Structures are given as structure tokens and as C-alpha cells.
Amino acid sequence: MLSKCNVFKEELEDSYKKIFVSKKDRMQLDTSSKGSQIRWYKDNIFIKLDCLGYEGISEELVSKLLDYSNVEHVQYEVCEIYEDNKFIGNGCYSFNFLNEDEQVFTFASILKKYSRDYATFNYDEVFEAMYDATGFDVRIYLDHCICIDAIVKNEDRHFNNLAIIRYSNGKFS
């Protein structure tokens, strides 16, 4: 049975899109509870390198699961990443979902300005602080994230990977 799994894995990896980037396309290192993840932005595409070997597959699986829901989400697909024409590993990519007049703000960036103690906030305190700071009710979004994380056993949820969008008129969504 194991050899059939290995053959399937090889066939699957052969179908991965190949993405070519250069070192100059790298974004600022992004940290998670699992460590740092190398990211690039090129041609309106965000690319993330797997650090543990499974992140890209997890991202694609969750986005495909969410296709069957009413939850707005980013589409991810697994890929092979080549930096300066050298294969450096597998990962995933997504297209930029923002319009020109939109900007992403992480909960961390907003909550840091609200309170130095934000990391100790409970659910209601996060909701209240985000509403006070932005005027946007994040409760439904937060509930969706918590529910999806429980289903897929996401261990990497933190304030740097929760975010909302600010429009040019200053409103958040």
C-alpha cells in the first residue's frame, strides 16, 4: 500500500505549477508560531514556501473545503518554487485579492495601537477592541476562523494571521 501512496504523491507533485521568483521578490519575513516562512510577491501573486513540508497542501485543502461554504476566502494552490532558477521547495500561491484602494491590516497591527496587553485579551476583549479601533464587527469573521481551525486542527492561529481590509474611505471590512 505504501508504494501506491508514493506513486500517487509523485504524480501529484508532477502536476504542481512551477513558479519562478528571484531573491529580490522576497517579502519581509513573516513569523508564525511554527517559525518564519519565506514569502514572495511577483506578478500580482503571493507565494509561500513550506517550512514543515505540508503548509501548501493544507492551504489548498482548506480553500477547497471553503469552496463548499458561504465563507469568503482566498484560493490557494500548491506549487514548486524556484528562486533564481534553483528549486528550493514546495509551497503554495494565491492571487492578490485586493483592489488598488484596499489595504490589509492584521489584528496585531491594530491591537498593538489599542493596548500593549492585547496578547492576553479573551474573545470578547478582542471583539470590543477591534470594534473600538475600526468600527467593524469582526465577530462573524472570528467565529468562522475559530470553527474552521477546529475542523482542520489549525495550530497556527494568531493575531498576525487574522486580518481585515481597509478601503480608501477609511471603512473596514
Image (cartoon, rainbow, N blue to C red):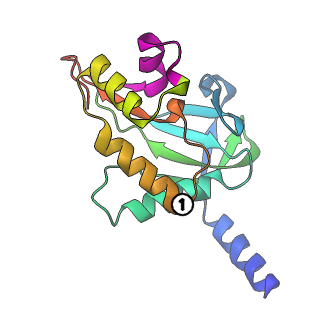
Q: What percent of the width, then of the height, locates residue 96?
A: 40, 37
Seen at 33% across and 43% down, the residue is: 141
Q: Position of residue 25 (x, y in %)?
A: 60, 27
Q: Secondary structure at mark 1?
A: helix
Q: Which residue is mark 1?
A: 152
Position of residue 153 in the picture relative to residue 127 (left or right) = right
Residue furthest to the right in view is: 3
Q: Is 19 positioned to the left or the right of 63 in the image?
A: right
User: Residue 74, can we see it?
Assistant: no
Quadrant for the C terminus in the image? top left
Judge whether 4 appears above or below 64 on screen.
Answer: below
Image location (x, y in percent) of residue 168: 22, 18
Magenta-tinted stretch: 101-118
Q: Which sits in the foreground, 131 or 103?
A: 131
**For residue 51, what is the image quadrant?**
top right
**Residue drawn at point x = 51 percent, y = 31 percent:** 159
Q: Nearer the viewer, residue 98 or 17?
A: 98
The residue closer to the viewer here, 146 or 94, is 146
**Is 48 inside the magenta-drawn segment?**
no
